[in-house]
Image (tube, rainbow, N blue to C red):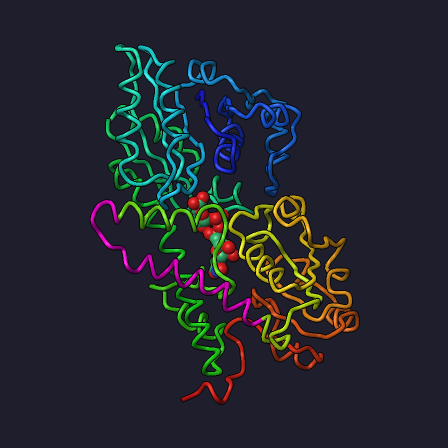
Amino acid sequence: MKIAIIGTGHVGLVTGACFAQKGHKVICVDNNHGKIKSLQKLIMPFYEPRLEQMVRRNYKASRLIFSTDIKQAVNFAEIVFIAVGTPLGPGGGADLSQIRRVAKEIAHHLNHRYKIIVEKSTVPVGTAEEIERIIKLYAPENASFDIVSNPEFLQEGSAIETTLRPDRIVLGVKTKRADNIIRLLFASFNSKILVTDINSAELIKHAANSFLAMKISYINSLANICEKTGADIKSVAYGIGLDKRINPHFLNAGIGYGGFCLPKDISAFIHISDKLGYDFQILKAVRDVNNLQREFVVRKIKKSLRNNLKNRHIGIWGLSFKPDTDDIRESPSIYIIQKLLQEQAYIKSYDPYAMKEAQKVLPNIHYCRDPYETAYKTDCLFIATEWDIFKNISLPRLKAIMRQPIIIDGRNIFEPEKMKKLGFVYHGIGREEPQISQIK
Ligand code: UGA
């Protein structure tokens, strides 16, 4: 099939590459000329495992092209995906200005040749109806089209895998014609296809991300209870995860969720619920718990250095919001570093991919060549992202080079018993020994 993808962010570019990989002809469009020029030279705008090879292969096979010309793309395609950003707006809701602009532009280039316009961007329920209204307003009278909602569930760091083999494909459709064509497009993905009405499809996306965030805030709350009782969060998470109704995924306690999706989607879902007249209390608590978790971690680091960070040397392992990405948007690591800098700590950091991005927001910290240089002569080491390179470190060497062997492990990558035996002062999340005074 002939496909146009508007927007070459994480969702648009990965989706475009994956459709091309499936043998479709894909044109990816963006109004950022610099980005399109780079993509034409096969320079990726972000790091994502396997993406560059996939783009390269399909570009060379002429199945994937990049353009700034939306008219060319709409004329060419049978199916047009809207995959532009829906960042957080000023009031906490989703900023839909890019969606509206693109809908208007697509409308101008429609004609009697039937097309499917797919809403791929994450949007609040009711947005497809608005897109349809906009298109009808600006399209010529003979325009023939249907709107479909196809929320994406890709995870950064494993975006190719989670796009090609998602747990499910959700398609919100209104007409039989669109249903038949869009099912055909996804038939080769070998995943369960769920076809619903459009509003349900839109809601599934916000509901899924919110549920994942809820699991994380729940396990982080439990971790705090563990610290007060001497229970171990890893055992507790394993114990509850064995129940099939709960399942073991997304039960890793840590420093709170970050990234471009979960924080903004939770906020947008709360916002649209308020607008609909429903006070979504659980979600508000999920967001508040997540914000508090970062503060707990800052307090933990401070406490390990006797509440005085002035001129103390702190090493930070990891800047991205999770491993296998260079994405630092809403990364808890960045937030925590900013807090430590306010207390006049001296910060050194290493991240395998995210240092270039981090330099833009944290120009005044020292960036290191590797994890050891980061830990060298530090008073405390904080582990913010669970990259494999950190898990495979030589612990005796690490102990030998630190000024004080204090580790705050925000991702629980090491075992407290082992670390203690090696002579570290080690604090994980939800894995503390209880402080006698805390037990009432
Ligand atoms: C998330 C969803 O998982 C995807 O399904 C969705 O498609 C995507 O948002 C989106 O809306 O585009 P992503 O933002 O890539 O994907 O990141 P996640 O893997 O969900 O991780 C989010 C945050 O939660 C990270 O900071 C991670 O470290 C944290 N996390 C995750 C935990 O603290 N504990 C866990 O057990 C799992």
Along the line of sight, the residue nearer the viewer: 242 or 397? 397
Q: Residue at x 34, y 23 (%)?
A: 116
Work out whether residue 409 can be spotted: yes
Image vertical order of residue 172 relative to residue 412, above or below: above
Q: Quadrant of the C terminus?
A: bottom left
Q: Is residue 28 visible?
A: no
At x 41%, y 43%, the residue is: 88
Image coordinates of residue 377 in percent, x first then y, are 77, 68
- Name the quadrant containing residue 236: bottom left
Q: How far from the left and from the top, in percent, is residue 125?
A: 28, 40
**234 within the magenta span:** no
**Residue 97 lies in quadrant:** top left
Determine whether 188 is above or below 440 in the image: above
In this view, the residue farthest toward the left is 277
171 or 440, nearer to the observer: 440
In this image, 18 relative to 209: left or right? right
What residue is drawn where x is 66% and y is 46%?
Answer: 359
Could you tell me how many numbered marks the image carries?
0
Q: Is residue 277 above or below residue 173?
A: below
Q: Give the main secondary structure of the magenta stretch.
A: helix
Q: Where the N terminus falls, by quadrant?
A: top left
Residue 51 position within the rendered picture, expressed as x and y whole percent measured from the top left = 59, 37
The location of residue 330, given as percent across then percent down, is 51, 50
- The magenta stretch is 274-300
281 inside magenta stretch: yes
Residue drawn at (47%, 80%) of the image: 231
Locate residue 169: give its quadrant: top left
